[in-house]
Image (spheres, rainbow, N blue to C red):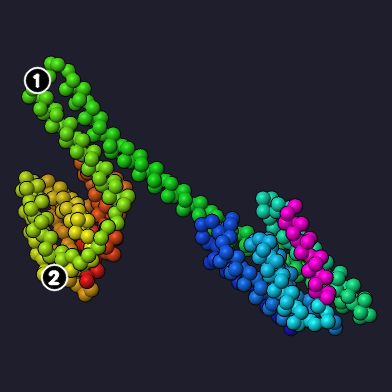
């Protein structure tokens, strides 16, 4: 029973650190194919500790010989981290074996002198990573290495006049089988982990490319519309029978469409690079006057009354231009949500360590599905908007360390709640 416990303990000590290394350390872009210096050092450290533990706690103990699994960490280092890592682990356990075995050290050196060239030749000639049965070749290598170790041990016993009995032969057979099964288990786990990591990285890469392609297609579509309209008016203007009055009207429409295209490009660039260049203490309570001067004519033309209720000294860490851009975007959305007129209420107060800004309208409102899609590329509840302004606003607030919450019901209005860390 003790023999079985020692065997399970050896397998556990081998499996857990090596598998955790592949899960935690190698789950980074580029580390599966090429290891940096720190990755190799970490793998050398893990494999060395596992090999030393196996040498210190053998599972088969006979007079003159101990059987352990120290070959497997050496193989793992060679196969999955490179020749340098394998040689480093071999050198360290060779030093440890000299400290442990003393006079029997020569047999350990002989074993490594035979196994290492064989392992290097196997790696160089087999090209095993590019073959389909990736688990068979390391497993076969472990079995052959264990068999070679057993043969050298047998030669050592014969030369030392130590009796070779059935128990020794049985232990030798079990020793080879244990190496085969343990290496198969480790190779299987490592292969599955690496496949999952590769699949996850490919999925993330594909998602980024899909988002980029959708965004590029949306930008092209949104810019093509005003450019098509502007081109049509320019063709009309090139005709001689157009009156001066119509030329002025058409010229104004061309300028309006070009300004619309420029606004789309500006929003797109703000979304692509929303980071504020300089963050500084900003008193949000001083912004309503600027916001009122900018949007009062726009609100008055649509029959909307803007009301402010702001506490004093609402200081945050932000960029004034970016913050104004965000407030203008959200306020314009609130005004446009009230086509028949109404009241837009902007409230600011401090709650704990947060500065809260609420922009509330009594307009058409939104459904739960529309709320969930807010901030996604080119989604808008109106036909006139591109949706980029809302996306930019979300990014700006996140840049300042805050977040936006939206509550709304159809025909009952919408409330945008901005939470930002107070200074």
In the rendered image of this protein, does residue 344 appear above or below residue 12? above
At x 13% / y 50%, what residue is drawn? 335
| Contact (Cβ within 8 Å) of mark 1 with mark 2 | no
Magenta stretch contains residue 335: no
Q: Nearer the viewer, residue 101 or 6?
A: 101
Q: Which mark identifies residue 313?
A: 2
Crowd around label 2: few <14 · some 14–19 · many ≥20 (10 Å): some
Residue 38 image-quadrant placement: bottom right
In the rendered image of this protein, does residue 408 appear above or below residue 91? above
Side (left or right) of 384 relative to 273: left
Magenta stretch contains residue 109: yes
Residue 378 image-quadrant placement: top left
Mark before the other along the chain sequence, 1 or 2: 1
- Residue farthest top in this picture: 241
Q: Position of residue 356 (x, y in %)?
A: 19, 66
Q: Position of residue 377 (x, y in %)?
A: 31, 47
At x 25% / y 32%, what residue is drawn? 227
Q: Position of residue 177 (x, y in %)?
A: 78, 68
Distance between the Cα atoms at labels 1 and 2?
58 Å
The residue labelled by disc 1 is: 243
* Count of residue discs: 2
Q: Magenta: predominant secondary structure element?
A: helix
At x 20% / y 67%, what residue is drawn? 281
Q: Quadrant of the C terminus?
A: bottom left
Side (left or right) of 215 relative to 66: left
Q: Position of residue 183 (x, y in %)?
A: 71, 65
Q: Nearer the viewer, residue 56 or 61?
A: 56
Q: Which residues are magenta?
A: 106-125
Q: Secondary structure at mark 1?
A: loop
Crowd around label 1: few <14 · some 14–19 · many ≥20 (10 Å): few
Q: Quadrant of the N terminus?
A: bottom right
Q: Nearer the viewer, residue 141 or 286?
A: 286
């Amino acid at each position: 029973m003790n023999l079985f416990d020692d065997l399970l303990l050896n397998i556990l000590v081998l499996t857990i650190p090596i598998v955790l290394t592949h899960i935690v350390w190698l789950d980074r872009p580029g580390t599966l194919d090429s290891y940096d210096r720190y990755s190799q050092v970490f793998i050398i450290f893990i494999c060395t500790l596992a090999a030393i533990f196996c040498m210190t706690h053998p599972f088969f103990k006979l007079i003159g010989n101990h059987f352990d699994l120290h070959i497997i960490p050496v193989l793992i280092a060679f196969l999955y981290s490179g020749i340098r890592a394998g040689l480093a682990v071999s050198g360290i356990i060779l030093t440890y074996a000299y400290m442990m075995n003393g006079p029997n050290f020569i047999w350990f050196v002989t074993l490594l002198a035979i196994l290492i060239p064989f392992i290097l030749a196997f790696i160089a000639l087999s090209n095993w990573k590019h073959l389909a049965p990736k688990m068979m070749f390391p497993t076969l290598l472990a079995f052959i290495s264990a068999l070679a170790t057993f043969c050298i041990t047998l030669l050592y016993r014969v030369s030392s006049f130590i009796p070779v009995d059935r128990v020794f032969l049985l232990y030798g057979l079990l020793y080879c089988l244990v190496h085969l099964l343990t290496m198969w288990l480790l190779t299987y786990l490592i292969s599955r982990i690496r496949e999952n990591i590769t699949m996850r990285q490919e999925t993330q890469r594909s998602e980024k490319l899909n988002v980029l392609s959708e965004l590029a297609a949306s930008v092209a579509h949104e810019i093509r519309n005003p450019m098509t309209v502007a081109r049509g008016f320019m063709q009309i203007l090139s005709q001689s029978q157009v009156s001066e009055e119509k030329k002025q009207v058409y010229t104004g429409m061309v300028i309006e469409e070009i300004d619309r295209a420029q606004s789309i490009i500006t929003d797109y660039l703000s979304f692509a690079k929303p980071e504020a260049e300089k963050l500084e203490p900003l008193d949000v309570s001083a912004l309503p006057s600027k916001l009122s001067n900018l949007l009062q004519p726009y609100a008055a033309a649509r029959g909307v009354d803007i009301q402010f209720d702001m506490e004093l000294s609402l200081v945050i860490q932000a960029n004034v231009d970016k913050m104004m851009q965000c407030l203008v975007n959200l306020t314009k959305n609130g005004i446009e949500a009230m086509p028949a007129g109404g009241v837009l209420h902007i409230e600011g107060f401090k709650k704990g360590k947060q500065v809260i800004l609420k922009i509330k309208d009594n307009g058409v409102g939104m459904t739960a599905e529309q709320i969930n899609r807010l901030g996604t590329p080119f989604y808008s509840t109106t036909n006139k908007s591109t949706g980029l302004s809302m996306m930019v606003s979300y990014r700006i607030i996140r840049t300042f360390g805050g977040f936006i919450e939206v509550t709304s019901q159809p025909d009952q209005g919408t409330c945008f709640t901005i939470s930002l860390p107070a200074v």
